[in-house]
């Protein structure tokens, strides 16, 4: 896909996050993007194809970012902090109906997102745990595979509207509590000492 198509998908992703998926028709999307529907159909065949391509672009971008953070942040806790910041920033304002809309109306897009969350994210966290253990920042008696899968399952819970109604809990708050729970659970004494210093530097509570 050329740069124009990539730009359209990126802007559509922002629309979906802000307004939801089901409520947006192709006419609505074209109007919000300031393009004709004919131009939109140069890059997608229908709305389902649009949702699938938008989700694939989001997933590809998040995978590339996670891999980049692993490369530039050797310290396991630093990497986890930066990944958490990115997730909270990007998904903090996500429309509460998106997961439901994808599951019910766009199963292919939901499958792409679910595979990313349950497989790639879990593998990324497993590598982070293994690195943290090697660095002495995480407890040696952890099972990286089990803990990483528990983390991935908690990520799924963060966006479950039945567990956390959108009118009472926002994603950023839920995700912050999950991260606090996770880091406190895996950190060694050395890791907790490092955390205290990092908290002071970034002026946050964890």
Image (spheres, rainbow, N blue to C red):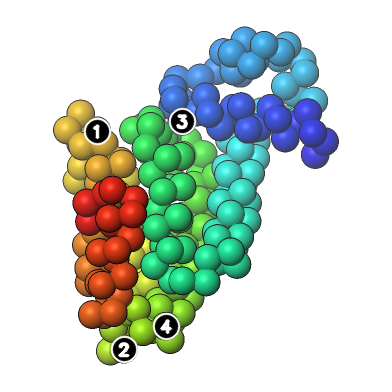
Under circle 2, the secondary element is loop
Counting every numbered tag in the picture gives 4
Residue pictured at 33% horizontal, 54% vertical: 201
Q: Residue furthest left?
A: 168
Residue pictured at 77% horizontal, 18% vertical: 39
Residues marked 2 and 4 touching at CB (< 8 Å): no
Q: Which of the two discs, 2 and 4, sits closer to the camera?
A: 4
In the rendered view, would you say 190 is above or below 39?
below
Q: Is residue 182 visible?
A: no
Under circle 3, the secondary element is helix
Under circle 1, the secondary element is loop
| First along the sequence among labels 1 and 2 | 2
Q: Which residue is mark 3?
A: 17
- Quadrant of the rendered structure where residue 98 is? top left
Q: Which residue is mark 4?
A: 135
Residue pictured at 33% horizontal, 65% vertical: 151
């Amino acid at each position: 896909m050329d740069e124009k198509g990539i730009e359209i998908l990126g802007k559509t992703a922002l629309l979906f996050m802000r307004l939801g998926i089901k409520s947006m028709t192709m006419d609505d999307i074209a109007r919000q993007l300031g393009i004709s529907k004919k131009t939109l159909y140069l890059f997608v065949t229908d709305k389902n194809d649009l949702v699938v391509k938008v989700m694939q672009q989001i997933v590809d971008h998040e995978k590339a970012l996670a891999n980049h953070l692993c490369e530039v942040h050797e310290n396991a806790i630093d990497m986890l902090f930066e990944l958490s910041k990115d997730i909270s920033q990007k998904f903090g304002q996500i429309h509460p109906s998106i997961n439901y809309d994808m599951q019910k109306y766009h199963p292919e897009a939901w499958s792409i997102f679910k595979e990313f969350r349950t497989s790639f994210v879990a593998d990324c966290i497993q590598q982070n745990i293994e690195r943290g253990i090697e660095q002495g920042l995480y407890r040696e008696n952890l099972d990286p595979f089990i803990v990483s899968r528990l983390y991935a399952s908690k990520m799924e819970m963060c966006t479950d509207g039945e567990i956390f109604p959108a009118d009472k809990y926002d994603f950023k708050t839920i995700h912050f509590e999950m991260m606090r729970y996770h880091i406190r659970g895996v950190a060694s004494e050395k890791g907790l000492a490092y955390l205290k210093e990092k908290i002071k530097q970034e002026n946050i509570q964890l």
